Amino acid sequence: MANAIVGVTEPQLYELIDLVKKVQGFDFSCYSKASLKRRLARIMMLKKLGFYELKHMLINDPHFFQWFLEEVTVNVTEMFRDPTFYKALTTQVIPYLSSFQHIRVWSAGCSSGEEVYSLAIILNESGLNAKSFIYGTDINTEMLDEARKGIYSLRKIKSYTENYQLCNLPGSLTDHFTIMYDAASIHSELKQNTLFSIHNLVSDNVFNEFQMISCRNVFIYFEAELQQKLLDLFYKSLCPLGFLCLGSKETIRFPDFKSKFKVINQKENIYQKVGN
């Protein structure tokens, strides 16, 4: 079992990428190779698996593959994460969104729904809930099931409360939840205008027109080719003058980007679509 903590070699990595694509239909070929190798090493260490045992599990155990998918796609999320991002949304994007007759928002890579509900709270506090609809998408079905429930432990709510306060939003985060013993459920008025569904950013296409797209902490796990593909997808998915919100962790270096988007907030990587 010595190999279990070492992870995979470069040829083994490409063999696994090819295997997952053929057997499960998920293409990780444009994901950051360094990130993939780190995630695979962690998976093999946690499950005490060698390379050939890992291959066997990926082919024959669908429950293991779902867990594998969750580990590889790095579902790190929390409500109002990076409060400066939400403060920028509130001051620089929401006022403009209010001018649209309908507001469709896409939270791409939504994980267990915390960002979707954060956006729902901001739209509700701005008086825009009635004409807003938020689509949360991910490739992980288990995370999407959690998102649909909208139930989070009180321990998590306590940690999210500090973020909420730093956003300078009114009242308390718990005003938007119903407390139930050791958990809290998001209010139904915030859930009713949301839809969670599977969408694979690597292989799926445009499915609606949006006034705003939020895709944070996702690009950093993709190589340049896939990043460019995603930017094209988001550009086609945005209405004229719609907003693309990527967050402060991303670095955008594409020569044609400035011809497609106007900078709204450089630090938080918030952009507005120009052209049609």
Image (tube, rainbow, N blue to C red):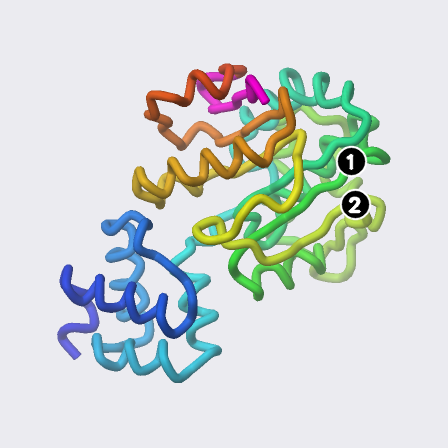
Query: Between residues 78 and 263, which one lies in front from this camera angle?
Result: 263
Asked whether residue 35 is drawn in magenta, I would say: no
State which tag comes first along the sequence, 1 or 2. 1
Q: Which of 79 and 12 is in front in this view?
A: 12
The amino acid pointed to by label 1 is Ser
Task: Tell me the SS state at disc 2.
Answer: loop
The percent position of residue 11, horizontal first and vertical second, equals 14, 64
Q: How far apart are marks 1 and 2 (CA)?
A: 7 Å
Counting from the top left corner in percent of width and height, residue 5 is at 20, 68
Along the viewing direction, whichever of 201 and 75 lies nearer the viewer: 201
Task: Give, as a single range, the part of the protein colored magenta.
Answer: 265-276
Secondary structure under tag 1 reads strand
Q: Residue shown at 42%/82% (left/top)?
A: 61
Answer yes or no: is residue 236 visible: yes
| Whether residue 6 can be seen here | no
> In this rendering, is residue 191 above or below 172?
below
Q: Work out whether 10 lies above or below 121.
A: below
Density class for disc 1 (Cα within 10 Å; few <14, some 14-19, many ≥20) is many
Q: Name the residue under label 2.
A: 193
- Asked which quadrant contains residue 15, the reply is bottom left
Q: Residue at coordinates 78% horizontally, 59% vertically from top-left? A: 180
Q: Which residue is drawn at 43% across and 73% down?
A: 65
Q: Quadrant of the N terminus?
A: bottom left
Comparing 201 with 78, the one in front is: 201
Q: Which mark is residue 132?
A: 1
Task: Report whether 99 appears left or right of 64.
Answer: right
Residue 165 left/right relative to 123: left
Q: Mark 1 near mark 2, Cβ–Cβ under 8 Å?
A: yes
Residue 273's image quarter?
top right
Q: Quadrant of residue 54?
A: bottom left
